[in-house]
Image: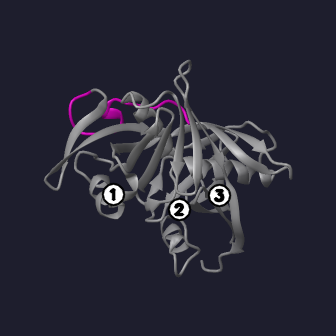
Amino acid sequence: MKFVKMHGLGNDFVFFEDKQGADKDFSQLAVKLCAPHTGVGADGIIVIVPSDKADVRMRIINADGSEAEMCGNGIRCFAKYVYDHKIIDKKEFTVETLAGIMKPKVILGEDGKVSLVTINMGKPFTNRSQIPMEGPEGPVVDEPLEVDGKTYKITSLLMGVPHTMIYVKDVDAVPLHELGPKFETHKAFPRKTNMNFVQVIDDHTIKVHTWERGAGATLACGTGSCACAVGSFMNGFTGRSVDVQLYLGTLHIEYDEKDGNVYMTGPAAVTFTGEWLED
């Protein structure tokens, strides 16, 4: 099986095409491919399959074998893959995901290949039942949540996948590997949650470290960056236009006042190509 390794600001994926892959179970293959020492090593695999609802369909399976609804960095890489491989010949097209139809717009570099991608990530859902999160209906903004006997103030929303945020003074000081899984599996979130720790730099810049549901600590999270930009606006920390600083670069997020959609712009890159010889 031929594959392409790609990353969006360090959030890395193994890509391959499967025209009969609409209903296949890729969970065990994902675990094997994503293993850092015995496999290719990645945060997840992304399978390109045909769609009867959009121009093309994206399936993303996390490193633990669970299938995700959406991935912001993943869909930027996906858009670059399908355009550069001539699966799609339009600069704006539609992608079917478990979170709905996404609309990428590719920006070409001097070599004629995709260098940046803008994604209409759709509207955030802020009601508790939509996240989903236990408790009374309404938005979850600066709300107390107890973890291991300590109370944290959280903001949660659904940005294709559930995301929770805690605002901190120094994001680099957060013990991500310790706290991340405790929030991910907290009983308040029946479908688990992605966990983001956010430092506000100024009224248009934030810095984010993310623990991803099903993948663990990642260098970047696109849906998380979008969620944190929206959450920062909801808390009154920033405006609607936000630069999100990640480990290896910056994503630009626009939370559009007119249509209510979130637009993400950032890079996507090919790391290497190869062939997986195991079944």
- Upstream in sequence: badge 2 or badge 1: 2
Name the residue type under label 2. Gly
Residue drawn at x 79%, y 53% is: 84
Mark nearer the viewer, 3 or 2: 2
Name the residue type under label 1. Gly
Name the residue type under label 3. Gln
Does 170 appear in magenta?
no
Among all residues in the image, which is located at the extreme top?
258
- Upstream in sequence: badge 1 or badge 3: 3
Q: Badge 2: few (under 14), some or many (20 or more) residues near its Cα, within 10 Å?
A: many
Inspect this view and state whether residue 53 appears.
no
Between 279 and 148, the residue placed more toward the observer is: 148
Residue underneath mark 2: 44
Secondary structure of residue under mark 3: loop
Secondary structure of residue under mark 2: strand
Residue 8: x and y in percent read: 61, 55
Between 181 and 229, the residue placed more toward the observer is: 229
Mark nearer the viewer, 2 or 1: 1
Q: CA distance from mark 1 to mark 3?
A: 36 Å
Residue drawn at x 50%, y 51% is: 221
Q: CA distance from mark 2 to mark 1?
A: 18 Å
Kindly indicate whether the residue at mark 1 contacts the one at mark 2 (C-beta within 8 angstroms). no
Residue 193: x and y in percent read: 35, 49
Magenta stretch, main secondary structure class = loop
Kindly indicate whether the residue at mark 2 contacts the one at mark 3 (C-beta within 8 angstroms). no
Residue underneath mark 1: 180
Among all residues in the image, which is located at the extreme right?
111
Q: Which residues are magenta?
A: 121-137
